[in-house]
Image (cartoon, rainbow, N blue to C red):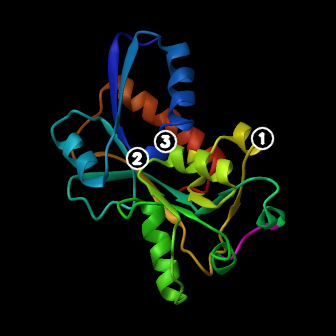
């Protein structure tokens, strides 16, 4: 068991519902003296948090070449279409973006990585994204898509395996249509992490490597 310590994390929204709560719970079972601060931050805010030491670790999508950001791990994240299990597209192993647009869609706002990748895919295929719902909350988008039986989009790390067997399911978008995203785990360049943060980073790396394609 570690001595008392604190781990501060700045992260994208997709990590908040499932992955980080599970990993922090596992960590604190072994090290109950360690406290955590988990803060929702966009890419630029995450870098600022590293620079001023209000975050030890940042976990963000597609950092725009952040000068102070030292990448520790990259996690491959294809965009998934999220829908009800009885949706006509749910029987496909992968889905084409054009097929999704035959149905009403709900999209995150333009500041998010999922929307950025969808916009790239739509432009390259000369398609128009015309969402009936837009929101900066992925939790709202998931729940509303199920309520109204429409399609929304998310990275797989933000989807619960339990939820996928219940009211919703997801299918990866065909990579010919929409490029995959990349989740970056990083720290401030030149900084030696406190022991508690370094140990948690090691646990996080192991959990991500077990579930996803990483580099």
CA gap between label 3 and label 1 equals: 20 Å
Classed neighbour count for the residue bearing mark 1: other residues with Cα under 10 Å, few (<14), some (14–19), many (≥20):
few
Of 49 and 207, the residue lying toward us = 49
- Residue assigned mark 1: 166
Classed neighbour count for the residue bearing mark 2: other residues with Cα under 10 Å, few (<14), some (14–19), many (≥20):
many
Q: Residue furthest left?
A: 52
In the rendered image, residue 76, in percent from the top left (x then y), is placed at 55, 60
In the image, what residue occupies the spot 42% across and 13% down?
2
- Residue assigned mark 3: 15
Left or right: residue 116 versus residue 70 is: right
CA gap between label 2 and label 1 equals: 25 Å
Viewer-side label of 2, 1: 1
Describe the element under mark 3 as helix, strand or loop: helix
Describe the element under mark 1 as helix, strand or loop: loop
Classed neighbour count for the residue bearing mark 3: other residues with Cα under 10 Å, few (<14), some (14–19), many (≥20):
some
**For the residues bearing labels 3 and 1, Cβ distance under 8 angstroms:** no
Q: Earlier in the sequence, mark 2 or mark 1?
A: 2
Q: Earlier in the sequence, mark 3 or mark 1?
A: 3
In the rendered image, residue 145, in percent from the top left (x then y), is placed at 62, 53
Magenta-drawn segment = 92-96
Describe the element under mark 2 as helix, strand or loop: loop
Q: Residue furthest bottom?
A: 126
In the rendered image, residue 173, in percent from the top left (x then y), is placed at 65, 69
Of 210 and 96, the residue lying toward us = 96
- Residue 12's disc is 2
Left or right: residue 136 versus residue 146 is: left
Left or right: residue 17 versus residue 90 is: left
């Amino acid at each position: 068991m570690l001595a008392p310590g604190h781990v501060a994390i700045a992260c994208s929204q997709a990590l908040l519902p499932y992955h980080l709560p599970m990993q922090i719970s596992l960590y604190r079972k072994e090290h109950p003296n360690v406290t955590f601060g988990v803060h929702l931050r966009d890419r630029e805010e995450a870098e600022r948090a590293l620079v001023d030491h209000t975050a030890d670790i940042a976990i963000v999508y597609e950092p725009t070449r952040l000068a102070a950001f030292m990448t520790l791990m990259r996690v491959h994240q294809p965009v998934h279409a999220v829908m009800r299990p009885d949706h006509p597209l749910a029987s496909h192993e992968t889905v084409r973006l054009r097929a999704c647009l035959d149905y009403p869609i709900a999209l995150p706002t333009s500041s998010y990585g999922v929307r950025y990748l969808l916009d790239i895919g739509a432009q390259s295929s000369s398609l128009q994204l015309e969402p009936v719902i837009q929101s900066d909350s992925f939790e709202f988008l998931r729940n509303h898509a199920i309520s109204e039986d429409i399609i929304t989009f998310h990275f797989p790390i933000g989807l619960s395996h339990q939820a996928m067997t219940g009211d919703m399911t997801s299918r990866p978008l065909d990579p010919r249509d929409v490029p995959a995203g990349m989740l970056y785990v990083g720290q401030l360049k030149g900084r030696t992490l406190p022991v508690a943060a370094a140990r948690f980073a090691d646990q996080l790396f192991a959990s991500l490597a077990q579930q996803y394609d990483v580099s």
